[in-house]
């Protein structure tokens, strides 16, 4: 089975669109028989995503550093828990376990995780697909930055061509499973 890693917020914004999208994505990943890899937390949109996959008989693997056990609270219903020592190992493990990566809206943790996926692909550590799911124009500002950095020459044509933004759950799953 192919695994999809999803990076997303450990908090829940008041605008319901973010939790709704996390729910839709979790459900669709399970229905299409992909395994879900995520940070293992029982909080925020992370919890909503995991719950939705589990409710639809999906396999959900949580990768949680021991330092976060108290803060984020390990989801009690996961198919598999991978305990790691720290944040660095978490990112490495999530990347190793997964065949593609989706970034839903989130905070600085989400950015750190997806940017490491991008930069590790740029330097050839892996060759796996990734995509930003741009809900409610959340990633418009980030896309402006990426395009600006590309126009100036900070990001190569080749690397820029790998960075995709899509606006639906279906497109996001297709982007990381068909390339
Ligand atoms: P946030 O987007 O800030 O809500 O964080 C989303 C997830 O990223 C949470 O599970 C955070 O614990 C996690 N996170 C934050 N910083 C790091 C990091 N340096 N390495 C790995 N995961 C992180």
Image (cartoon, rainbow, N blue to C red):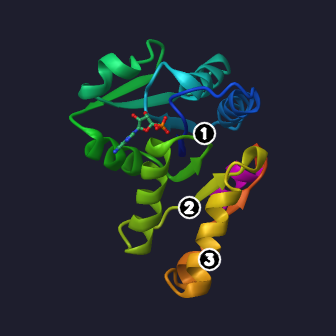
- In front of the other: 179 or 153: 153
Picture quadrant of ligand 1: top left
- On the image, the x and y values in percent for residue 131 come to 62, 57
Give me the residue at 71% from left, 32% from top: 31
Specify the segment rendered in magenta.
171-178
**Element at label 2:** loop
> What residue is disc 2 on?
129
Residue 177 horizontal side relative to residue 122, left or right: right
Q: Which mark is residue 34?
A: 1
Question: Closest to the observer: 113 or 141?
Answer: 141
Residue 176 seen in the current view: yes
Residue at position x 40%, y 25% from top?
A: 80
Whether residue 179 is visible? no
Q: Quick check: 55 left or right of 155? A: right
Q: Residues within 10 Å of mark 3 (few under 14, many from 20)?
A: few
Per the model, the C-alpha gap separating discs 1 and 2 is 15 Å
Report whether the residue tagged 3 is closer than 8 Å to ligand 1.
Answer: no
Q: Is residue 57 above or below residue 161?
A: above
Name which of mark 3 and mark 1 comes first in the sequence. Answer: 1
Which residue bears the numbered disc 3?
148
* Residue 63 image offset from top left, x and y in percent: 37, 33
- 156 above or below 116? below
Asked if residue 163 lies left or right of residue 119, the reply is right
Residue in view at x 21 percent, y 34 percent: 85
């Amino acid at each position: 089975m192919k695994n999809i890693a999803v990076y997303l917020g450990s908090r829940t914004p008041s605008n319901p669109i973010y939790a709704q999208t996390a729910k839709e994505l979790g459900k669709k990943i399970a229905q299409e028989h992909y395994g879900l890899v995520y940070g293992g937390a029982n909080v925020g949109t992370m919890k909503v995503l995991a719950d939705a996959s589990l409710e639809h008989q999906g396999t959900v693997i949580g990768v949680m550093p021991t330092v976060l056990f108290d803060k984020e609270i390990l989801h009690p219903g996961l198919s598999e828990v991978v305990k790691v020592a720290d944040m660095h190992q978490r990112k490495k493990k999530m990347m190793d376990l997964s065949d593609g990566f989706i970034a839903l809206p989130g905070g600085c943790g989400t950015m750190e995780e997806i940017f490491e996926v991008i930069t590790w692909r740029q330097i050839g550590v892996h060759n796996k697909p990734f995509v930003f799911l741009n809900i409610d124009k959340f990633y418009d500002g980030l896309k402006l930055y990426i395009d600006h950095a590309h126009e100036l020459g900070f990001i190569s044509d080749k690397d820029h061509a790998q960075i995709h933004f899509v606006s639906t759950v279906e497109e996001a799953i297709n982007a990381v499973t068909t390339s």
